[in-house]
Each structure stands twice: as C-alpha cells, then as structure tokens.
Image: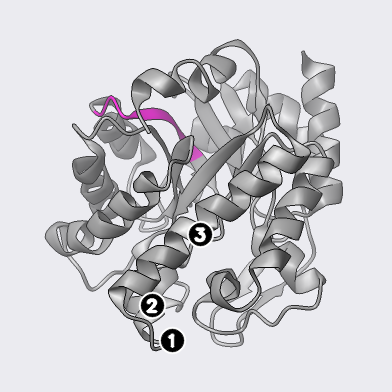
C-alpha cells in the first residue's frame, strides 16, 4: 500500500467530493444476533464466523457506503493470545479482516475502498479507556503495542489505515511516529470531547503533530457525540474525517450503551461545510442511518 497508488484512489476522491463511510460494524453484528460481549468484540468473529462480517460489510455497501472499515478495531496480538492463538495465527486473522472487507467491496461496491481499522490501546484493554485516555503506557510502550499490527494490516493491502478512536496526545504521538516515513496512507481520528481529547488536551496539538506526517492524508473525529463534530473540526485545515457514534453513553462495566440515539443525518451538511470529506457513523449507527447520510451528501453536492 503506497501513497502513490492511493493518490489515484481515495485521497484523489476526497479532494474532489465527499466520501461516505460505513457505520458501526459491531452494532450491526449485534443486531443480527451475534454475542459480542467478549473483550475481543467483533474481532472474535474473524475466527468464529467470518461470513457474518462479510454480510455486515455488504449491508453497509448496499446502504450507500463507499468505504468498508475492517473488523480489526480490537484485533491485537495480546488480545488474540487470550483466545489461545499464537502470533502467526493472530496475524492471519488481522490479514483476514482486510480480505473479508475487500471481498464484500468487490461484490457490492467495486468502486469502493477498504479501510483497515487500527483501534486504540484502550480497545484492547476493553475497559472503556478509549473514552478516557488514562493509559498505563507511555509513548514508547504505545509504539510497541501498535508497531507490528500496523505492519501486518498494511501488508494485507487495504486502501488506507483508519487509525481511530485515539483518546490522548501520547497515543497520537506514538502512531504518528510509527507511520512517519513508512510510505503508508492513513487517516487519524480522535474520540474527542468538544475541542479537547478525551484526556482533556487540546485537539489542536493532535492536528499539529499529524500535519508533520505525510502519511496522514486526513484527520478528524469518530465515536464522539454527533453534536461535538462541528466544534472539533472548526478551524482545522486539510481533508477531514467525521464519523460520530449515536451520542449514547458506553457503560464499560455492563458492556452496554445507555440513553437514546442522537444521530441525525441532517447534521452532515454542517460537517461538510466544516471541511469533512469522509463522513459516516460509528457505534450504534446502522445501515439505515448511513443511507440517510448518503442522501445528505448527494444533496450537498
């Protein structure tokens, strides 16, 4: 996966027109009856039911999405060790996540793209810390955590790496250092709270770090409240990405979402006006919501 090849694909597309992302993959899998209560969440199905993942990607493509985000958000080497897998088997499952998304793309949206999800360290911890950023690792430790999985996912040949739901500047620094000079293509997306990271730091510091990394072709926010998107993106230059969750709260102890959905595709126009060129949804945002996002993007053209 090289910047040269991407320039004829996704990044050229977003330079000209907005691109519709998919929604919450795990949300859809749960709605289809799959138990995702383990620490691996949807990544468990890479081993146990890969066809269900293909079907979920296909459903989002059929709703209008142009990008499939792989089921690798919580895929990690230490996480798969908990399933009794060795490093080679874990790497194979990460590569499989890209192959499954590519298959759905080829069958349902040949002009679409595959984004390999690089979830945060907090996703591996499965304790909700991707919404707090109170990690027990420093930048060096976070680099060690991300290094091999980024390599493996990139080797599988996605169109872009979706480095997503990052909650703190330490992890931004770590992933920027891991991406810089690799020739890969990535977007960087934070789980923000207004104009701050989840750890309470200024988002502007994250955007400044990313601006120095040629491999990062877009920055923005995901898995935040829909009402926070416009504030988070205000004044940020370059192509932006926005795919909030439903606005509901995550109870990490009971492993469930609380409250009512506040996702309103009518907000998409304001995200586009703020500079977003990749728009969609995250947790609790389903195919019907993405269909409405697609309509809003078309109306904004």
Question: Where on the picture, by quarter, is residue 34?
Answer: bottom right
- For this orientation, the residue located farthest to the left is 140
Dot 3, crowdedness within 10 Å: few (<14), some or many (≥20)? many
Instruction: Say what secondary structure mark 2 lies in.
Output: helix
Q: Is residue 182 visible?
A: yes
Q: Position of residue 6 (x, y in %)?
A: 45, 23
Q: Residue at x 34, y 32 (%)?
A: 207
Q: In this view of the protein, which residue sits in the foreground, 96 or 262?
A: 96
User: Which numbered disc, 1 or 3, marks the residue closer to the eye?
Assistant: 3
Q: Main secondary structure of the magenta part?
A: strand
Residue 115 falls left or right of residue 27: left
Residue 196 position within the rendered picture, expressed as x and y whole percent measured from the top left: 41, 46
Q: Does residue 91 appear to the left or right of 56 in the view shown?
A: left
Task: Measuring from the top left, give residue 262's x and y in whole percent.
Answer: 77, 53
Q: Which residue is mark 2?
A: 79
Residue shown at 42% from the left, 56% from the top: 198
Q: Which residue is mark 1?
A: 83
- Helix, strand or loop at label 1? It is loop
Q: Which of disc 2 and disc 3 is earlier in sequence?
A: 2
Asked if one can make out residue 223 in the rendered structure from this viewpoint, the answer is no
Residue nearest the observer in this picture, 140 or 48: 48
Asked if the residue under mark 1 is in contact with the one under mark 2, i.e. CB atoms within 8 Å, the reply is yes
Q: Residue at x 29, y 73 (%)?
A: 87
Query: Which range of residues does the magenta coloring cover?
Result: 213-220
Q: Which quadrant is home to the N terminus?
A: top left
Considering depth in this image, is 256 or 51 the residue closer to the camera? 51
- Which residue is under mark 3? 96
Q: Element type at marker 3?
A: helix
């Amino acid at each position: 996966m090289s910047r040269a090849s991407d320039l004829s694909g996704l990044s050229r597309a977003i330079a000209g027109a907005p691109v519709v992302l998919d929604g919450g993959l795990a949300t859809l899998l749960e709605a289809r009856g799959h138990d995702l209560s383990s620490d691996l969440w949807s990544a468990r199905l890479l081993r146990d039911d890969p066809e269900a993942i293909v079907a979920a990607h296909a459903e989002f493509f059929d709703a209008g999405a142009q990008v499939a985000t792989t089921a690798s958000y919580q895929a990690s080497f230490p996480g798969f060790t908990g399933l009794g897998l060795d490093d080679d088997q874990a790497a194979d499952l990460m590569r499989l996540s890209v192959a499954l998304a590519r298959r759905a793309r080829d069958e349902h949206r040949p002009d679409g793209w595959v984004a390999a999800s690089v979830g945060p360290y907090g996703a591996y911890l499965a304790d909700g810390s991707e919404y707090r950023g109170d990690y027990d690792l420093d930048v060096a430790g976070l680099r060690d955590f991300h290094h091999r999985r980024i390599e493996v996912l990139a080797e599988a040949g996605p169109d872009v790496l979706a480095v997503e739901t990052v909650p703190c500047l330490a992890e931004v620094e770590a992933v920027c250092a891991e991406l810089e000079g690799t020739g890969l293509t990535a977007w960087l997306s934070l789980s923000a709270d207004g104009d701050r990271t989840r750890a309470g730091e200024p988002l502007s510091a994250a955007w400044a770090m990313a601006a120095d990394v040629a491999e990062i072709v877009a920055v923005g926010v995901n898995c935040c409240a829909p009402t926070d998107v416009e504030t988070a993106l205000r004044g940020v230059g370059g192509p932006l990405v926005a795919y909030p969750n439903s606005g509901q709260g995550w109870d990490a102890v009971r492993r469930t979402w609380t409250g009512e959905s506040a996702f309103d595709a009518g907000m998409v126009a304001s995200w586009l006006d703020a500079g977003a060129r990749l728009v969609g949804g995250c947790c609790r945002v389903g195919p019907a919501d993405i269909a409405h996002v697609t309509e809003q993007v078309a109306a904004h053209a």
